Image (cartoon, rainbow, N blue to C red):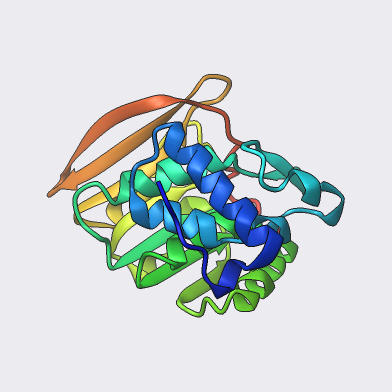
């Protein structure tokens, strides 16, 4: 794989992003749009400065408030799962967090809607996305369990924290044929793809994962 890094990820961070994308490609990520977005994303701006030297490692890192920035492989894998059949025109992200997953989606999908329950994380993520010149993201401070009904239906929904069961609101906000990519479980979590077919939902299990819990009704 040979990726060219553009202006949005120049210099050392650009080279680091490209190397990270190459590592993920070697681990099985094949979607070129996802790999290009990984290569062009300055992951170091999404982590605390004290951890910047680990930003391009394939590992999850703490971002404060008991939250984490997901392992790059998982970010890439979940993004790739949304793109297996067609390019969604809009996507709902539950759990903005640092904004890193948001930035990957925003480089690929025309409209991104993102819900975050922790206001301070939301504001930090907004500033980071603006610094990357990504302006196709709408943000909401709210309860991720409820989704974003006024903006539904969504071609795709991605959840970056694990509920113990699949929130009913997210299923109802999926468009026909839409996909929900979500980790589910408490101690043992499984990444799942839920595809809507009318009032029926087809479930596919992908792999074991580990996410922070999706906390219902807790907005701070």
Counting from the top left corner in percent of width and height, residue 209 is at 51, 28
Q: Quadrant of the C terminus?
A: bottom right
Which residue occupies the foreground of this view, 143 or 12?
Answer: 12
Number of marks in the image? 0
Which residue occupies the foreground of this view, 217 or 148?
Answer: 148
Q: Is residue 23 above or below residue 117?
A: above
Which residue occupies the foreground of this view, 217 or 138?
Answer: 138
Residue placed furthest toward the left: 198
Q: Is residue 128 visible?
A: yes
Counting from the top left corner in percent of width and height, residue 212 is at 63, 37
Q: Is residue 74 visible?
A: no
Q: What's the residue at 57%, 29% (across, down)?
A: 210
Q: Is residue 154 above or below residue 76?
A: below
Q: What's the residue at 37%, 62% (across, down)?
A: 91
Counting from the top left corner in percent of width and height, residue 82 is at 32, 49
> In the figure, residue 112 lies in which quadrant?
bottom left
> In the figure, residue 3 lies in which quadrant?
bottom left
Counting from the top left corner in percent of width and height, residue 30 is at 34, 42
Q: What's the residue at 59%, 57% (across, down)?
A: 100
């Amino acid at each position: 794989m040979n990726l060219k890094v553009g202006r949005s990820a120049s210099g050392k961070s650009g080279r680091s992003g490209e190397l990270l994308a190459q590592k993920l490609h070697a681990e099985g990520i094949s979607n070129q749009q996802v790999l290009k977005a990984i290569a062009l994303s300055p992951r170091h701006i999404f982590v605390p400065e004290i951890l910047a030297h680990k930003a391009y490692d394939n590992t999850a890192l703490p971002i404060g408030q008991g939250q984490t920035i997901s392992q790059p492989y998982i970010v890439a894998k979940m993004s790739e799962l949304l793109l297996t059949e067609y390019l969604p025109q809009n996507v709902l992200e539950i759990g903005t967090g640092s904004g890193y997953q948001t930035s990957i989606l925003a480089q690929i999908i025309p409209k991104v809607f993102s819900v975050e329950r922790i206001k301070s994380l939301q504001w930090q993520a907004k500033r980071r996305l603006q610094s990357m010149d990504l302006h196709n993201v709408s943000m909401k401070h709210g309860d991720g369990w409820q989704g974003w009904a006024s903006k539904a239906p969504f071609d795709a929904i991605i959840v970056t924290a694990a509920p113990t069961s699949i929130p009913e609101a997210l299923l109802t906000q999926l468009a026909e044929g839409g996909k929900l990519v979500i980790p589910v479980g408490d101690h043992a979590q499984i990444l799942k793809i839920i595809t809507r077919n009318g009032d029926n939902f087809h479930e596919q299990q992908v792999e074991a994962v580990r996410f922070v819990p999706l906390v219902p009704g807790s907005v701070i």
